[in-house]
Amino acid sequence: MEAVTEQFEVVNRWTNRVQFTAEITCAPDATIGVKIGLAVKWARNSGADLRGAVLRGAVLRGADLRDANLSGADLRGAVLRGAVLRGADLRDANLSGADLSGADLRGAVLRGADLRDANLSGADLSGADLRGAVLRGADLSGADLRGADLRDAVLRSFKADMWMTLAQNIAEIPALIQALNDGRVDGSQYAGDCACLVGTIANAKQVHYGSLEHNSRNPAEQWFLMIREGDKPGDDTGGGFAAGKALEWAEEFQRLIIDPVPA
């Protein structure tokens, strides 16, 4: 099927007016996602403004968007697997449900970005600005968050789910805290000396992990997937960061149990 050239309009998220018209060449039966991806690449080469653009579902696997200004863009469901977004400005962008697995987001600005249910597995977010970002339901397994700024980021789903697990296993909290401090947590393993959240609790109870309520898709288990054997709180690694937050949440919960706030 012979490729055709067409004029493709991209509108603004806030005004719904045409922001730029890209000249793209693609197969006649190309999906809208492919066309939007081509429009983004055209915009990058032509200097067109991508701020606030509606780029929903764009297919940009492995695309080089280094230092791109995509602030406020609507990238819901976009396929950015393995894309290079190093230093990109994605503040206030809507990336909910986007596939950013393996993406290079080093130093990217994601302040206030909506990353709900986004796939960030294996993504390099070292040094990224994630202040105020919404990460509810995001898959962060294997992500590198070294030096990332997560102040005011919405991590409530991870923390709340972990607290739910701790509330059902109060006696094992000290063992979990010790395991985190000793680097004896491996979020990818349910059994063995180094195990995930539920696995570590099962070890402390001296029971099989299968006897405890667990689900690998639970937010807390997804958080623990970032931690590998040997990762300790304070380590300059993504796993060290994740272990540090898990330790912080465990110790905070323990303090509330031991010394509850008066009614």
Image (spheres, rainbow, N blue to C red):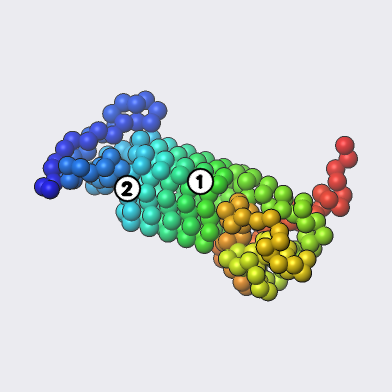
Where's residue 166, x and y in %? 75, 54
Left or right: where 86 falls relative to 143 = left
| Gap between marks 1 and 2 measured at Cα | 18 Å
Where's residue 15, x and y in %? 37, 25
Q: Residue at x 42, y 50 (%)?
A: 99
Q: Is residue 134 above or below residue 191?
A: above
Q: Is residue 166 above or below residue 94?
A: below
The answer to whether any part of residue 86 appears in the image is: no
Give the number of the disc on residue 144: none
Residue hosting label 1: 117
Q: Nearer the viewer, residue 51 or 159?
A: 159
Q: State the quadrant of the C terminus.
A: top right
Q: Nearer the viewer, residue 67 or 18?
A: 18
Quarter-wise, where is residue 169 in the image? bottom right
Indicate the amino acid at tag 2: Val
Q: Residue at x 71, y 67 (%)?
A: 208
Where's residue 215, x and y in %? 61, 55
Indicate the amino acid at tag 1: Asp
Where's residue 117, x and y in %? 51, 46
Report crowding for label 2: few under 14, some 14 to 19, many 20 or more residues within 10 A (C-alpha): many
State the SS at label 2: loop
Q: Nearer the viewer, residue 40 or 129?
A: 40
Left or right: where 115 falls relative to 23 = right
State the SS at label 1: loop
Number of on-image labels: 2
Q: Residue at x 18, y 40 (%)?
A: 23
Residue hosting label 2: 59
The answer to whether any part of residue 167 appears in the image is: yes
For this orientation, the residue located farthest to the left is 2
